[in-house]
Structure formats: C-alpha cells, structure tokens
Amino acid sequence: MDKLKLGIIGLGRRGTVMIKECYAERNDLDIAWICDNDEDKLEEMQLFMKEKGHCPQTTLDYHDILNDSQVEAVFILSSWESHVPIAIDAMEAGKAVGMEVGGAYSLRDCYRLVEVQQKTNAFFMMLENVCYGRREMMVLNMVNQGVMGDIVHCAGGYRHDLREQVANGIALRHYRLRNYLNRNCDNYPTHALLPIMKVLGINRKNRMVSLVSVGSCSKGIAEYVNKTGIGKAEIEGKTIAQSDVVTTVIKCAGGETITLTLDTSLPRYYSRNFEVHGTKGLYVEENDCIFLDSEEMNENKDFPKKLYSNADDFQEKYDHPLWKKALEDGLTGGHGGMDGLITDAFVYCMKNGLESPIDVYDSVTAMAVTALSEESIATGLPVAIPDFTNGAWLIRKEQPNHIYSL
C-alpha cells in the first residue's frame, strides 16, 4: 500500500505525544507537513522528524497544508476551539480528516460538520482511541455475541486528576485553563460515551433522545493553586466556572440509560468508569469484573474476592479479533496500543474506501453532549438531543464487517 501523505495540525501535548510515540514510527505515513502557532515547537518537531527519516515542511498557517494538492489527509490535534473550523476547511479542500476528541461549543458547529461532510463526501473520522481499548472491544464483542443479553444501562466517565495541567495552563500553553475559567459542562465526553454508543447501536437503529446534567460546586482548582502556588498569578482572584464533578444522565430511544461523569479537578486515580449492564450479565471497569447469569456465579452473589479482577479469565474466549491480531503483530503507539489501533483504522478504512468506523454522525452526537450539558446545568432542565442523522438512524445498517469495524 502506498504511504498516506499526511499533514499534522497542532503540536501541543497531544500532537507531540502522537507524533513521537506513534506517527513517526509508522511505515504507512508520509508526514509531509506539520503546523502549529508556535515556531519553537515547529523547529523542535522538525528536528525530531528528520531524525526519524521524515522531512516535513513547516507552517504557521494550516491553509498551506490544504493548498498542497499532494496531501491526502490531515490529522487535527490542535485546541478544542479550532477543531470544527479546521475540519470544515479541510473537507472543503478535498482532504480526508482525522479529528481529535473534544466537545462542541454549539449545536451549530455539529450541524456544520454534518452538512460539509455530506456535501463533500470526505472521509471523516474522530480519533477516539478508547473505542479501540482492549476491554472496550472485548465487551463490545461479548455484547455482539449476545453474552450480556439485552443491554439496559451503561456508564462511563473521564475521571482524571488534571489540576496541575489546568492551573499551569498559561505556562504549558494549554487550552484547558481558559475553558475551565469560562465554561461549565461535560467538556470531555467522548472517551466515555463513544464506546457506549457502539455497544448500544446509537445512530444505527437506536439514538440518544435527551439528557440532564448537574454540576457540583467548584473548589478543587482553587485549593490546588493555594496549596502549590502553581498558576497563582494567573488564577488568584478569578472564579473557576467548571464544576469539579459533572454528572449527566442520557435516555435512549430503545429505553436504555447512560450515566456520564466528568471528574477532573479533584485528587483521584484515573478511571473511565466503563460499565455495561445487561439482562444476562455485566462488566464493571472499576474492579475489572465480569458477572454472568450462570449457576456458578449466582452461587457467589456476595462477590467474593475471586470475582474481582476476573475479566482476564474471559479474555481467551472473548478478546476481540483485532486485539488478538495486534498482539501477535506487535502493538504500536501509546495508551496501551490504542493510539496505534485508531491510526491503523483510519489508514485502512480511508485507503480502502470503507465507511469510517467513527463517522461524522457518531462524532457530532458525542460532541453535542458538551454544549447540551452546558445548557442543562445552566437551566436545571433536561434538554433534547438532536437527531443529526435526520431520521436515518431508523434504517442505517450496521457497519461493514471488517477487523476495524465497531
């Protein structure tokens, strides 16, 4: 297969990690351009890339990449606010788009993405690596085989101590600080939600209908700044708008419910809080436990220790074929191999003319939770979730069956 000629837009924390740990090591990518607002980042990355055998051009203006007729695709790894405008410009320039995760700032942004993708028919994929997590894919495999029965409820979250990153936002040149100062919402829903959407068949014979969100008070960042002094000059005297914990409950057309939790401003361990509850069993990430409605397990309903962390016992039978293959071939990329697999999926599907595994409808449905949660928190009321498929969810077929389909 010919190498995919690629432009990379954004060299912040995510962009730098992805290039160094994933993209630069691959033999199926020709990284032709890198773009960022900061010249020092461009110079540093260009030196690194040359050491890895790539010779990218650099630019401060991403339109230079879009104007290069040789570039086939762009990966957008810039700040949240810039994702939609750049993606729209790229699709209108005839480029395939891989867009990093983040919530939408308005429903209008979501509709614009859909409209432009439909108009241009550009390949579009959100780079939500957690959809390719090993446990998420194993549970999806079990659900698809009927092992969990009918799914009734799912839960997920982004529970990650980001206090240092937020408080030190100016020094790090990171966009989280300005968002936490000015917005109150579930600002990072996709890690939790998109794997759940795949489990529940959202946008394919099912859809999310409404949500209600509530936010706690905001004390974690201020206390962290007072204790450590990090970010004190920039934050002292200012009010953090972002709640320490945001809880969102979603109702689906099929009757299922979803609970999402954003928890990033308090001391805690990392968790995506992934849970799938069905009529024949459940999976709970917090203790990596699978419980099935079997005679053996029903005799142990007090959950003795042997049932905790027992998901490995099911791995040989239910591990997703993609993960079995990846482990045999050798994993690449960070986050336990998820970064490599999401990149594999993009390149394979785009090059072979296949449907995007995380298409524009999936992407905007998940992204819209941010804007809708902001409205719900502000008003204290439930809000309707738009049907971005415009009724097509009733008749859309399952994705073509290949190793990267979800």
Image (cartoon, rainbow, N blue to C red):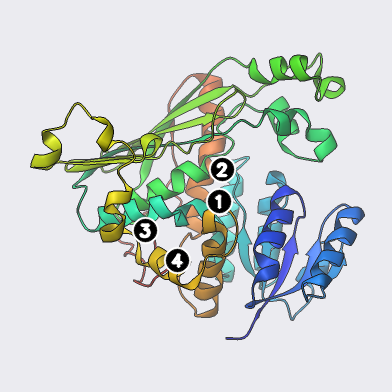
Secondary structure of the residue carrying tag 4 is: helix
Secondary structure of the residue carrying tag 3 is: helix
How many angstroms separate mark 3 from mark 4 (CA)? 37 Å
Q: In the rendered structure, which disc, 3 or 1, sits on the residue that comes first in sequence? A: 1
Q: Residues within 10 Å of mark 2 (few under 14, many from 20)?
A: some
| Outermost residue toward the bottom in this view | 1
Numbered disc in front, either 2 or 4: 4
**Quarter holding the N terminus?**
bottom right
| Residue wearing tag 4 | 327
Question: Mark 1 is on which residue type?
Answer: Tyr
Marks 2/1 in contact by CB < 8 Å: the verdict is: yes
Residue 65 drawn above or below residue 70: above
Marks 4/1 in contact by CB < 8 Å: the verdict is: no
Question: Mark 2 is on which residue type?
Answer: Leu
| Residue wearing tag 3 | 392
User: Between 122 and 6, which is closer to the camera in this rendering?
Assistant: 6
How many angstroms separate mark 2 from mark 3 (CA)? 19 Å
Residue 391 occupies which quadrant of the picture? bottom left
Q: Residues within 10 Å of mark 1 (few under 14, many from 20)?
A: some
Could you tell me residue 255's position as x and y percent?
26, 38
The disc at residue 111 is 1
User: Between 183 and 2, which is closer to the camera in this rendering?
Assistant: 2
How many angstroms separate mark 2 from mark 4 (CA)? 40 Å
Secondary structure of the residue carrying tag 1 is: helix
Question: Mark 4 is on which residue type?
Answer: Leu
